Amino acid sequence: MKLLTKTSLNYLSVTLFVFLFGTVAFYYLLRYQVNQNINIELEKRKSSILNQLLPAHASVYTPPNQNEKVVITPLKSIKTPQLNFYDTIFYVHKENKFVPFRQLGFVANFNNNDFYVQIYKSLEETDNLIVRVFLIMTFVVFLIIISLLIMVRHTSLKAWNVFYDTIDKVNNYDINSHNEFTLEQSEVKEFDDLNHGLIKMTNRINKDFLNMKEYTENASHEIQTPLAIINAKMEVLLQSDNLDEKQLKAVADAYEASNRLSKLNKTLLLLAKIENRQFPESTNVDPVALINNQLDNLEDLIESKEIHVDKHFEDAIILKMNPYLADVLLSNLIRNAIRHNLKGGDLIINCNQKSIKVSNTGNELKVDKETIFERFHKQSSSPESLGLGLSIVQKICEVYDFGVSYDYENNLHNFTIEFKHSNTKNNI
Amino acid sequence: MKILIIEDEKTLTDSIVDYLYEEGHICEAVYTYIDAIDKIESFDYDCIVVDINLPDGSGLDIIKHIKKSSKPVGIIIISARNSLENRIEGLEIGADNYLTKPFHLAELNAHLKSINRRINFSGNDHIIINEIKLIPSDHAVFVNDKELKLTRKEFELLVFFISNKNKVITKSSLAEHLWGDYMDTADSFDFIYTHIKNLRNKLLKEGCTDYIKTVYGLGYKFDLTQY
């Protein structure tokens, strides 16, 4: 949920609660105040009646004011006289409807006779007033709440827009792109601080990244040149005729070792480059063509191992990938499947819109399935192997957010690469 | 063939010169950009082997300089930089090949031979070694005038052997020549063994002398010295 939606909802629920509670309380308070006023008026009437009327005959006295009525009756005829203030309703013939009245009942003594006096005052007008005041107040408060909500939302939206823009840019930040990282200016200090911080951070990261890149390039350059010298010297040495077998063997071993070292250096450099996302350019790649090309390239070996190749390719498949990495990925998988195949085994390649699956016949591995993609993880049988092939496969899959998995079923080793939907189209 | 080597690493240059001299090439070596330009302007070369990173300039500028004149010169770049951009840039300005350090001298030699054939024979040459006749442009091989059916890899292997005849060729240089350099060594050795076995069988079947000798623990040798 967006922060703005959340605050708006909170605001609405709280104000709605206060509003409902407040209007009810407001109504009763108003009512109470009005009643108090009427009570005071009735009290005044009471004292004036006591002063003026009681000396006269006890009778029903109707004052000139229509909204008022005074009834005086002997107390004896009343069984339970209602004293003090209370509300009641009378039917008014003139207006043909029930009208609420407020009444004050009291007992007055006159000539040793007790009289029960009731003073009535119509509440019709005051009630109308209360309702009107109440409605107007409710409307005004409601208007205030709504306009406040609109105002808060509007200003927040404007302020948050900068924030959303920042999030968007941070999400799409690509350290390999040479565009400068810029963010919008904000009127809100906090967002401005955040943007400043982010820009500072990305600049630092960029600088470090460039340094790292330079360092790896330089390191590899520095290592490759001496290796080139070692290899060249050995190669010349190998051609000389006056070495005995023991010396030749020693030179050969040293030569192979330096070869492995240079291969290792190149492969680790490739891994580092993949990890650093240094293969940004991507084009439409046809994996089927690449697979066929690889199989073509390895044709002789497949024949010599008497491997039966089974291809299941579904319609035209296009991957948006770096062509070099796509080639490395597929070639590593296929070579792996050939290397660990048995003589006369099967090599099954399934390729469709969602995934590529390379399967080969082979004995079950003694090692854990989870560790098969780890660096330098290898079956002890092939000491020359670097044990980096599957690790490269995994790294490339990471770059493109492909899922890669291994399982063993029916004497088949299966390596499956699943394209997440978005990756068949865009992204690096 | 007259070859100029431009490479600031003297020890590496020495080895290259030694190896190529044995092949019958005339080799000269310079170590700086200025000397290289000087040599190129004064003499004609068939082929130039150039390092990109020189102490006083870029090998790429030397290539651009050579390309200004219309003389047909083969150019091979040797560089420690393995990035795709460098490779593409080098080939775009007119280099014939791009070798990443460390490279095999046999590989360099094979490239030089192929450039030599392209420049001096316009690619229509025949290579004749005793009873074997190779026509690289047609990918055709004849043993005693009888055509031999070879797979593409077997053919490449034979050309590579013949380019480096009488030399010990290591398994790793064969592997890199055939499959490029981003390959795990383990399987390439299996592959090589298979390919060589097949090639040898096909040659022997047509009555060819068994020139391909295994040098134990090292590699192979296309040995013509005893015949």
Image (tube, coloured by chain):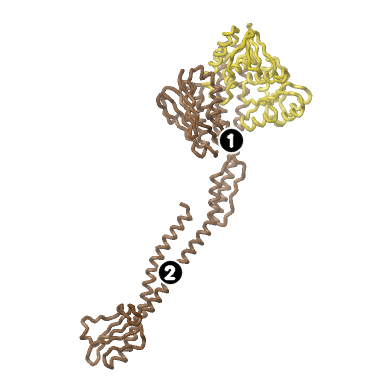
Tell me residue B141's x, y (percent): 63, 13
Residue found at x 44% / y 60%: A11
Q: Is residue B55 visible?
A: no
Q: Which chain is brown?
A: A
Q: Colour of chain B?
A: yellow
Q: Residues within 10 Å of mark 2 (few under 14, many from 20)?
A: some
**In terms of image quadrants, where is residue A34?**
bottom left
Label placed on residue A138: 2
Give the SS element for disc 1. strand
Tell me residue A104's x, y (percent): 30, 82
Q: The disc labelled 1 sits on which kind of residue?
A: Thr
Specify whether A395 is left or right of B35: left
Specify whether B46 is left or right of A253: right
Return the residue nearer the eye: A80 or A39. Answer: A80
Instruction: Give the quarter of the figure containing the C terminus of chain A.
Output: top right
Residue found at x 59% / y 36%: A281
Reading the chain from its start, which is encountered first: label 2 or label 1?
2
Q: Is residue A109 visible?
A: yes
> Which residue position holds label 1?
A283
